[in-house]
Amino acid sequence: FHLCCFSAETRSRLGAVASRAWTRPCANSVEEEGGACKMATEEDVAALSLAPSKVLNVNIGIMGHVDSGKTSLARALSTTLSTASLDKNPQSQERGITLDLGFSSFVVPIPDHIKEKAAGYEVLQFTLVDCPGHASLIKTIIGGAQIIDMMMLVIDVTKGIQTQTAECLVIGEILMDQMVLVLNKVDQLPADSREEKIKKMQGGLNKVFAGTKFKTPIMVPVSATGGNPDSPVAENLDGLVDTLKRLVTVPDRAKEGPFYFAIDHCFPIKGKGTVMTGTVLSGSVKVNDTVEVPDMKIEKKVKSMQMFKKSVTVASQGDRVGILVTQLDPKLIERGTLATPGSVPTYSGAILVVEKIRFYKASFPTKRKLHITVGHTTVMAMVHFFTLPPGAAASSGAASATAFDFDREYLTADELVDTSADMPAGSQWAYVIFEKAVTAPAKSLLIGSVLDTDVHANKCRIVMSGRVLSTIDPSNKDEVARLKVFKNKQKVGSIKRVVDEFTVIGKDLFKKETDITKFINLKVSLNGALQGYIEGSFGSSGQYKVRFQQEHGLPISAKKGKGKGKKEEEAEDGDGEGPAQGGKIILAFKKYLFAADAGKGIIQ
């Protein structure tokens, strides 16, 4: 039912917005009474008056390129509006675009295919999360996407896929399993060729989406608002709602575990306190519970709660709720979280299992900085990529996705690479050092982007996705040293002088200032064959003595003249080009990048 199906008195009782009453007919209109709407029955009204505990809530994200008609779609579908909906932000109204997340909802009967799993619920509520589409607001889009169960990707049927359409698709692939393509603004197509143009657009989109996880998404052509004189009313919204009902599944909700709540708006109510609105991401909360603002380490007691203007005493994972507390300055919280006290850590470094976004075509080298988004927080961070050495047995997918094995050795990677048969999902990791500490639960999902690139460039800015496996303190050398990441190194030197059948003096492996004691007893080879080891330094100019296990067969250098000092001997040897100079001394070793003691970081 639309709002026009209810009397003004009933709308007021339900908390709906009276000014949203339609004057044009909806799908329930009857020809009698001049096309007025068929009024809802008392049973229909009772369904909307149910206690929130009887309402199954599913969050649907509305995403897409700027000006594709997302907010118009939310307006056309919704019967209940939150304090943050339909571009109520004054800056949004001034600029004519969505700048922040908007929330509204509508209810439908429980579909037959989920009634068994939805036992105990009496109606299904779709909460619409209207995400901004402007390129500069990608951080807000990512934050909003992490609280939704299902996605509607809105495409302007007159333009097709645009830059932010593609980025929203990327976010959808990371975070969601279900998506509906909404082909909006069909009223702007000429009536005589509309069907043909819609089919052509659908054919092109099928080719694009064939290479995504969604394969063959369901497409629903609609007109969220009438813009054409020949099409004065919205088109096919009932068809869209029917599609959502057909595809919806009962989300897995866990009431157990620590409470965690994503705050998206915060505002004061005079004489009562501060309201924080948002979505419960895990656990549950009750009136009179003590909750913490983890970023600020402030604890407050929950005084009251509401779900879409209805008072409740408990809220669980997936619920959209407003939480009232006292003596909290709302100016301190624009975005943030609430949680069970002490349950959410703050950390400056983390180890992630990561995967490159295949739409990001540029190379992304190790030790480069990027923007990391976790929840509604985005900070700069430096990433160091690594993987398993060649031939090492990979961990099972489940194990590598939930825990990090500090007992294993890992090979540093020059760059993040695409997932493939040679590099399957779950076989690349990243050590991330945040420029500013983040506060987020264990196992949080993170998204890495290069948001400092040109927003008008026609390329994907989302680089990778990842999940936290372990937190780490970058300032604690012993803690970082647990990370056994090495780099294979090889140095090649030459023979300066042959001392005897087993011993030579070498040069060119080390600089003058190198501490050669770190390399004593490391194995070397002569021309990649004969094995020996570094016995010690020789002189003070980076030269060294090598002892071979077998006779090397090189001609022994001439004896030095009597009475000459060591420095004179070294200088005399420096420019010679005899047979001895023909051999190459090869030193191969592992350098552990995060060893607490640099000397212990060089191992064979």
Image (tube, rainbow, N blue to C red):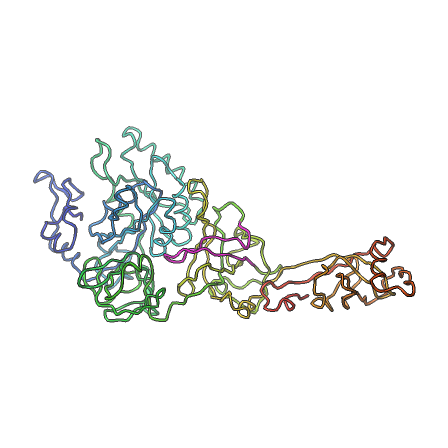
Task: Identify the residue at horizontal 26%, vertical 70% (top origin).
Answer: 301
Q: Is residue 369 magenta?
A: yes
Instruction: Find residue 65 and report its horizontal and vertical position in percent.
Output: 36, 42
**In this view, 185 is above or below 149:** above
Q: Is residue 457 visible?
A: yes
Q: Is residue 456 left or right of residue 536?
A: left
**In this view, 215 is above or below 258:** above
Q: Is residue 219 left or right of residue 362?
A: left
Q: Is residue 139 left or right of residue 588?
A: left
Q: Is residue 245 visible?
A: no
Q: Nearer the viewer, residue 368 or 513?
A: 513
Instruction: Find residue 100 and report its horizontal and vertical position in percent.
Output: 31, 50
Instruction: Find residue 256 and report its horizontal and vertical position in percent.
Output: 33, 69
Outermost left residue = 33
Q: Is residue 23 magenta?
A: no
Q: Which residues are magenta?
A: 364-386
What is the quadrant of the C terminus in the image?
Answer: bottom right
Instruction: Find residue 595 and report its horizontal and vertical position in percent.
Output: 59, 67
Task: Identify the residue at horizontal 59%, vertical 58% (top origin).
Answer: 412
Hey, which quadrant is residue 186 in on the image? top left
Q: Nearer the viewer, residue 476 or 63?
A: 476
Hey, which quadrant is residue 272 in on the image? bottom left
Q: Nearer the viewer, residue 559 or 195?
A: 559
Magenta: main secondary structure: strand
